[in-house]
Image (spheres, rainbow, N blue to C red):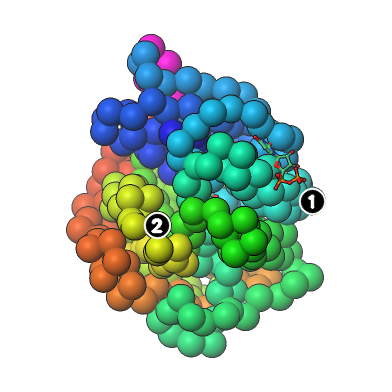
Amino acid sequence: MLVTGGAGFLGSHLCDRLLRDGHDVLCVDNFFTGSKRNVAHLLAEPYFELLRHDVTFPLYVEVDRIFNLACPASPVHYQHDPVQTTKTSVHGAINMLGLAKRVKARILQASTSEVYGDPEVHPQREDYWGRVNPIGLRSCYDEGKRCAETLFFDYHRQHGLDIKVVRIFNTYGPRMHPNDGRVVSNFIVQALKGEDLTIYGDGSQTRSFCYVDDLIEALVRMMDTPAGFTGPVNVGNPAEFTMRELAEKVLALVGGTSKLVFRPLPPDDPRQRQPDIALAREKLRWQPTVSLEDGLRETIAYFRALLQA
Ligand code: NAD
Ligand code: UDP
Ligand code: UDP
């Protein structure tokens, strides 16, 4: 099994899971946002290999299955070098699809709810085409991921590739990058340091947060679905919260004296986001099992240990 972006937050949990299931895992990462620390505990495993490689360059290896996760996922990181973000999504997809074609591997794309942009339908179903700004600050990520989906479906139609496309909604948990600017890690790190929690805008915008273990289960199930099923399929937790509610939950769990402070809303920030997971329930026999409170507890424990180290 090849996992691109395998040293990242989701990728490292996926490597853990695939090894536990008895697979031989090749983890490929350029360590842009991922880190060796996320997979250091796997380096001694005989069926784990770590390769430093940038997926925008060709890769010749022999594998049966490819999980294509390589791509910075947080706005701070993907906007740092937006041209490289588009290249990673687009050239990375072309290279991994070329590889899958040559070795006849099944290939799964980690797509995103961002393909729906700032949506005008709620909750979002897979047949919604989205409302994405093609020239804004988020476009390198959103349009890169949309183009990657196009490439997946064209390789499927044109070359008969066995593809799986998963649209991941906001996911959180241990091994998120502490400085990557995503809301869950920001709020937890701020609360643990006794700093004020930065709410962008008035905090009435919503997101639906899925705990990493639930998400990994969905990826594995999707990879194992029959060849006829390509997706795209939404995976995420439909429980929807405002950012103000999230901040209050984090504060209640961490304790301390932090307050909520309000900062300007970044441009193109989606107002509302909630997955419709009827398709995942039907085809993957999957639904999330971890509540936000339980997931936050695990994540807080991780960041507490990290900050003390
Ligand atoms: P992450 O930043 O922790 O992981 C991405 C990994 O890809 C990192 O290890 C990074 O070093 C690596 N990478 C980046 N560019 C690369 C390149 N050119 N070549 C090789 N490796 C490269 O983020 P994550 O949250 O683990 O996201 C993993 C995937 O899931 C991404 O494709 C992301 O778009 C998708 N996704 C995540 C979420 C979420 O909420 N976490 C939501 C939607 C989609
Ligand atoms: N590719 C790769 N590994 C492989 C096979 C292909 O990285 O094992 C890359 C190759 O560099 C090519 C891309 O995948 O540019 C697309 O391959 P495809 O066969 O679809 O197209 P072509 O080689 O005809 O451009
Ligand atoms: N956000 C916030 N404070 C922060 C970081 C983010 O209020 O410190 C908001 C952000 O504006 C967005 C939501 O939280 O409305 C989720 O942001 P994140 O970057 O985690 O994910 P995305 O916007 O890509 O869903």
Q: Quadrant of residue 5?
A: top right
Neighbour tally class for label 1: few under 14, some 14-19, many 20 plus, Cα within 10 Å? few
Q: Where is residue 193 drawn, in percent x and y? A: 43, 41
Which corner quadrant holds the C terminus?
A: top left
Q: Where is residue 79 drawn, in percent x and y? A: 71, 53
- Image: 238 above or below 62: below
Q: Where is residue 107 drawn, in percent x and y? A: 50, 48
Q: Which residues are magenta?
A: 39-44
Q: Where is residue 162 drawn, in percent x and y? A: 49, 53
Residue shown at 52% from the left, 62% from the top: 112
- Image: 98 above or below 37: below
Which corner quadrant holds the N terminus?
A: top left
For disc 2, the marked residue is 227
- Image: 45 above or below 82: above
For disc 1, the marked residue is 83
Ligand 2 quadrant in view: top right
Secondary-structure class at tag 1: helix
Mark 2 Cβ inside 8 Å of ligand 2: no
Q: Disc 1 vs disc 2: which is toward the camera?
A: 2
